[in-house]
Image: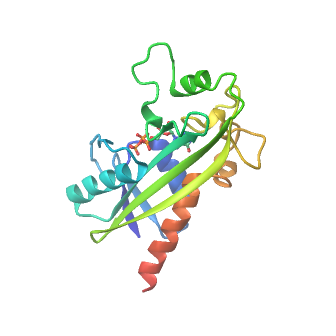
Amino acid sequence: IELIFATNNENKVREIRQALPGGFAIISLKEAGILKEIPEPHPTLEANATEKSTVIYQLTGKNCFSEDSGLETEALNGAPGVLSARFAGGEPEYASNTEKLLALLKDQENRKARFKTVISVIINGKEELFEGLCSGTIAPEPRGNNGFGYDPVFIPEGSSKTFGQMTLEEKQEFSHRKKAVKKLVVYLTSLVDS
Ligand code: ITT
């Protein structure tokens, strides 16, 4: 099964490629020669995922999928959530999204957070959505340089390491993205078998 992956985030490509079993091939926008920034104008991960897959399906007519992900914290009522990629955008006092998050959670006892991934897949024009969640806490300061985005400050439940201190194989044991991919694989397999 071959699918175009409607993303410009190479880290997502690497993680999803690693999570897929044999027999599944994904082609990133870059590999497909599609240079396109896809807008994410909606207030939910679901709607943004749908937007991204739909834009690429309409452009190519090929089976494709996208994913929209975010980090939600309890103390900040779900922020940064759908704004995760642009959290500190334009605010000169913060060098990064992670720095802003740590600043807002400074002295905050409730450090509970979760990552959420929503995959939107379009096969022969029909869309399905799949979700993956990973609960954990926000570390007091960044630890480790692996992964991307908020990985150095996120400690998944069941580990004492941040995602930033884990190899990709270790991250996959907890990963929101991998959980959503597993559901996608079950769905795609059921289509092939039916
Ligand atoms: P595309 O829309 O092109 O797929 P993007 O980077 O804009 O790529 P999102 O809109 O889904 O992707 O933004 C999600 C942001 O949340 C991402 O840029 C990271 O900062 C963060 N994020 C998502 N998954 C993460 C993970 O597994 N580990 C750390 N940070 C993550």
Which residue occupies 35% across, 52% down?
A: 47
Q: Residue furthest bottom?
A: 194
Image point (55%, 66%), residue name = 21
Which residue is rendered at x = 26% and y = 59% of the image?
Answer: 57
Q: Is residue 181 visible?
A: yes
- Residue extending furthest toward the top: 93
Q: Quadrant of the N terminus?
A: bottom left
Horizontal side of residue 179 vs 7, given as left or right: right
The correct choice, above or below, for 183 with respect to 4 in the image is below
Q: Is residue 168 above or below residue 164?
A: below
Residue drawn at (25%, 53%) of the image: 55
In depth, the one of 48 and 65 nearer the eye is: 48
- Residue 20 at x, y = what percent? 53, 62
Q: Is residue 177 left or right of residue 136?
A: left
Q: Find residue 144 and report its horizontal and vertical position in percent.
A: 68, 31
Residue 74, horizontal then vertical, whole percent: 61, 39
Picture colour scheme: rainbow
| Quadrant where the image shows the C terminus | bottom left
> Residue 17 or 109: which is nearer the viewer?
109
Tally of numbered discs: 0
Q: Residue 70, how many percent across, how many down?
A: 50, 43
Q: Is residue 28 visible?
A: no
